[in-house]
Amino acid sequence: MDRFLAKDELVFLPLGGSGEIGMNFNAYGFGPADDKQWIIVDCGVLFGREGSVPGVDMLMPDVRFLAEQHENILGIIATHAHEDHIGAIAPLWPSLRCPIYATPFTARLITGKLDEAGLTSKVKVKEVPVGGQLTLGPFTLDFISITHSILEPNLLAIRTPLGVVAHTGDWKIDPNPMLGEATDTAALEKLGNEGVLALVCDSTNALVPGNSGSESKVRESLTELIGTLKGRVAVTGFASNVARLDTVARAAKAHGRRVALVGRSMQKMVSAARETGYLKDFPQVLDETEVADMPAHKVLYLCTGSQGEPRAALARIAADNHPNVHLAEGDTVIFSSRVIPGNELAIGEMQNSLAARGINLLTAEDHFVHVSGHPCRDELAQMYRWIRPKLALPVHGEMRHQVAHAKLARELQVPQAIVPENGQMFRLAPGRPELIDEVPAGRIHLDGRILVAEGEGLSKDRRAMAFAGLLVVTLVVDHKGRVVSDPLVIGEGMPEAVEEAVLKAVEGTIARNKGSDPDNLAENIRRAARRAAHDAWGKKPITRVLVSEV
């Protein structure tokens, strides 16, 4: 055993989800410095935003460090089924090529993603029972039930010959979650009594005092609120919060309304929950076309799109171009959700469109219609009292959240707290924790159906075109490089006067560069055209010069 301990080490490597909320990807390695075996905990995405990465659907972690040694990866373990924890599994699996493990509800949703990607014949998702255990090489993982805003969230107790790491995933403390298992406090206390090397823990609400609140209280409030409303009611929220969907459906039934699910992800979540043994008493739902002609006071729509997603159901309803769902003056939309940072503008525009048509809006600012799925400061303190780790490693948060979390851990007498960044590899044992390496930790963009590296410039060019347009100059030259026809200037997204100024500059450049070879002439024209556009307009468009030889 002494020889074994002398050569082996336990390391922690985040490649996503540190310094950001989303795209969670954390790896644990065990073994000699040059020959470790790895497990991956979660493999998630960030959704692209048009302002920063136009045209990009999803952002995923750069996993080249692990992909280059994929034969040493023992498996991907999903703590739960949110997109920022499982959304990158299908796109990245061909690079990682390892088994996938999850509890039944999460496994059902991962399997659906793999099926859509055409990967089910190559990889199978292996189910772990709720509260179960899994052994992969030197790692033994206990799945401990906790609560969150989705079914079957798990804290992983990762046991190794060099110590135990508690990895929380996303969580909160809800004494009455309404659906699924409650937090297994006995298991957490037992884990703390055994001794825990490190706690890798959610930081999302580390700046928020108090507690996050219980789903049972939201059920009471929403049921009462829906009973006061006239006309059609549409409730939007996170489709993954199956307990909230159950609450809204039960509230609708209590007040004589029939429920229609509007949006593909709503239908997928309800189907997955039913297939895995949940929602046994869920009221019967109708197709959106079946309720179109029902009396307004008998209808409740459960809609996707609480974050203003342009292709989601509520955005189309707000624009009044949904094929089957139409809201009118006096109807009500309840936003049973929070605003994810970065989505404020899109949500505001959608709400303004609804308000302009006389539709009533109710949000968490008006009524008690939402609770967070992440731990506030009092809940974090309770977790530390249960686990009593030697080291705190705050993850899943922007830097300000992680720093506040680390400070709280120190106030709670945790011996050491380290704020990790993506790409930093920490040795957790033996000895004191320390940073031992840094590996590539960029981002991969899913651009349509194609994965491209962050630095390939597609988003940069699109942002530039959105700001200053595209300028194209075409030239026709003979075999001696002489320009044989008038140049053509085409501008997209710019005033006509700019094109006129550019054409004049191009003609002058041609006159001054007679006898230049076509490549030099093209570069001189490109510079002159861009400079002329800037002088006339104050902006520098993306500029291209196309040369055709006849």
Image (spheres, rainbow, N blue to C red):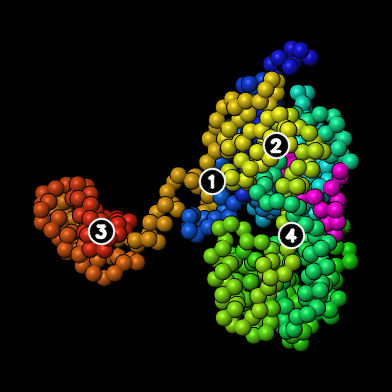
On the image, the x and y values in percent for residue 33 come to 63, 21
Residue for point 56% across, 69% down = 348
Q: Nearer the viewer, mark 4 or mark 1?
A: 4
Of callouts 1 and 3, which one flags the residue occurring earlier in the amino acid sequence? 1
Compared to 241, does 184 lie above or below? above
Determine contact: label 2, label 3, CB under 8 Å. no
Q: Is residue 492 left or right of residue 448?
A: left
Of callouts 4 and 1, which one flags the residue occurring earlier in the amino acid sequence? 4
Q: Is residue 525 left or right of residue 447?
A: left
Q: Amino acid at mark 3?
A: His
Q: Label 1 belongs to which residue?
A: 444
Which residue range is magenta in the image?
Answer: 167-185
For the residue carrying disc 2, how many other residues have a C-alpha within 10 Å: few (<14), some (14-19), or many (20+)?
few
**Residue 168 magenta-highlighted:** yes
Q: Amino acid at mark 1?
A: Ile
Residue 422: quadrant of the picture: top right
Compared to 178, does 374 lie above or below? above
Of callouts 4 and 3, which one flags the residue occurring earlier in the amino acid sequence? 4
Residue 387: quadrant of the picture: top right
Q: Amino acid at mark 2?
A: Glu
- How many marks the image carries: the answer is 4
Of callouts 2 and 1, which one flags the residue occurring earlier in the amino acid sequence? 2
Residue for point 53% across, 65% down = 345
Q: Label 2 belongs to which residue?
A: 411
Q: Label 4 belongs to which residue?
A: 371
Q: Nearer the viewer, mark 2 or mark 1?
A: 2
Q: Secondary structure at mark 4?
A: loop
Residue 284: quadrant of the picture: bottom right
On the image, the x and y values in percent for residue 480 come to 14, 50
For the residue carrying disc 3, how many other residues have a C-alpha within 10 Å: few (<14), some (14-19), or many (20+)?
some
